[in-house]
Amino acid sequence: MAKPSKKEFGKRRPAPAAPPSGPPVKRSGHVALLVMGTIAVGTTAYTLMPRQHCEPSPGAVPGQTTTTCSSSSSSSGGSDGSSSRWSSRSSFFSSDSSSHSSSGTSSDSGSSSVSRGGFGSFGHGFSGGG
Amino acid sequence: MRRIVCPERDDWRQTAEQCGFAFHTIDGERYWDESAYYAFTLDEIERGIETPTAEIDAMCIELAGRVIGDERYLRRLKIPEAFWSLIAESWERDDRSLYGRLDLKFDGQSPAKLLEYNADTPTSIFEAAVFQWTWLEQAIERRIIPARADQFNSIHERLIAAWKEIAAGRHVHLTGTTGNEEDAGTLAYLEDTARQAGLSTRMLDIEEIGWRDEPGGFVDLDDGDIALAFKLYPWEWMFHDAFGAKLMSAPTRWIEPPWKAVLSNKGILPLLWEMFPNHPNLLPAFFEDDARAAELGSSYVRKPLLSREGANVTLVSGGMPLDEQAGPYGAEGFVRQALSPLPNFSGFYVVVGSWLVNHEPCGLSIREDESPITGNRSRLLPHAIL
């Protein structure tokens, strides 16, 4: 494995901030949501809603953006929202890191050689957040 | 730093639901709690939280550079060898980080101490960035808090700015466990900020990601290429999943990038202590199998290398477990961190979440619990600068 050279060491240390030209920005000005408030989120909403593909309208100004969303129907891939908080999984990694395991079932999308379901099996029904 | 009891807004639940914050109450228990707020002075914010947050982030970046370049550390963190090059290449490319959250012990008097770094998949950012801000505006308007009150919170603007810089006009896919209400809410909010940055977006469940053999790559439900993806799904889970083996050959760029798998590992706590001994914002910490762990004596906090929301964390005092959160983690090993009890305000233990967007400290959120271990059901309270 290529190792970073010594000159790379610590390269990501953030540069000292430039002297502010005005008061430090510690607060928001106007917090506005573009579409989130108009689309309910959550298990039910996501699994029942058609999938959306959103493009900002040409010439849109952030903060005053208009967004065009096109929908496409698809089967739900959402997880089941299991009420069980923990699974009985005992280990993230086997000692042999090349032996990936998955309880998920890959499926053919119907188009040429595309398989799905290869992500999500490990965290099925659980929050990935922290 | 004070805890101030205050009246709730009569209509806060309706306000929450109108803006998509449907998970304000979980299993009948309040998650958002505005029956009190935490008040800080500007000096406490600037010198007590903002400056240490930047300092800790800088130390973490320096540590990441060292870990990624040394396989001894990668083994120590139990990162599978199959993914070392994925991590190293993302580091060398300088793949950008969007955000992260440091969980700090802070009582307003002593230096803030790093408890852990949620570097990979932090949630509660919508609550911190938007709903907490809405509370401030309405609480001032309704004279619940003084008119002069302010808040350490520019998360929203910084997210929009960071998307512009990091995505640079590219289409963004957002993915995660959308069947989980909180994760879906976090994804929806981040998608909203990406759109406000002028980006085109598409959300899909992590299970809906496809793999196309020729040419090899991850695709969405229309078999379109996933070139840049935000994922709210831990790297260690991706490594374990069946498609993990395809990560190396895929051209997809990920936010958070693979090198964040290093910083989301609690093994960084002993490594930071080793690299920056006696730093005022760190607690002594050691790997459990390190003889030096005995320096902590019989009182410490035992944390799995890989864990979220306080799961499998045990407080040990005088050799006896005081409190323990159940969970599925721990097979990869544990670290021990010096027991440094959380401040207790009116019977509630408090953790300060300090947010970084594009490496800039820019806001905070408060979690409160009757338990000294902060978990996924701990309540989130607003804060104000008075």
Image: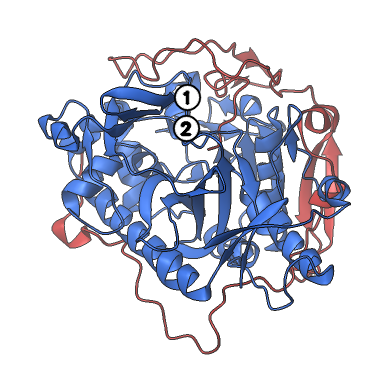
Residue at the farthest left position: B291
Residue at x 35% of width, y 76% of height: A16
Q: Quadrant of residue B221?
A: top right
Residue at x 79% of width, y 53% of height: B8
For label 2, the residue is B310
- Chain letter, disc 2 residue: B
Res B172 visible: no
As drawn, the chain in red is A
What number is the disc on residue B68?
none
Pointers 1 and 2 within a single chain: yes
What number is the disc on residue B325?
1
Q: Amino acid under label 1?
A: Gln
Image position, residue B75 (x, y; %):
22, 30
Image position, residue A75 (x, y; %):
79, 22
As drawn, the chain in blue is B
Q: Which quadrant of the rendered structure holds the C terminus of chain B?
A: bottom right
Front residue (pair B192, A60): B192
The answer to the question of whether label 1 and label 2 lie on touching residues, with beta carbons closer than 8 A, is yes
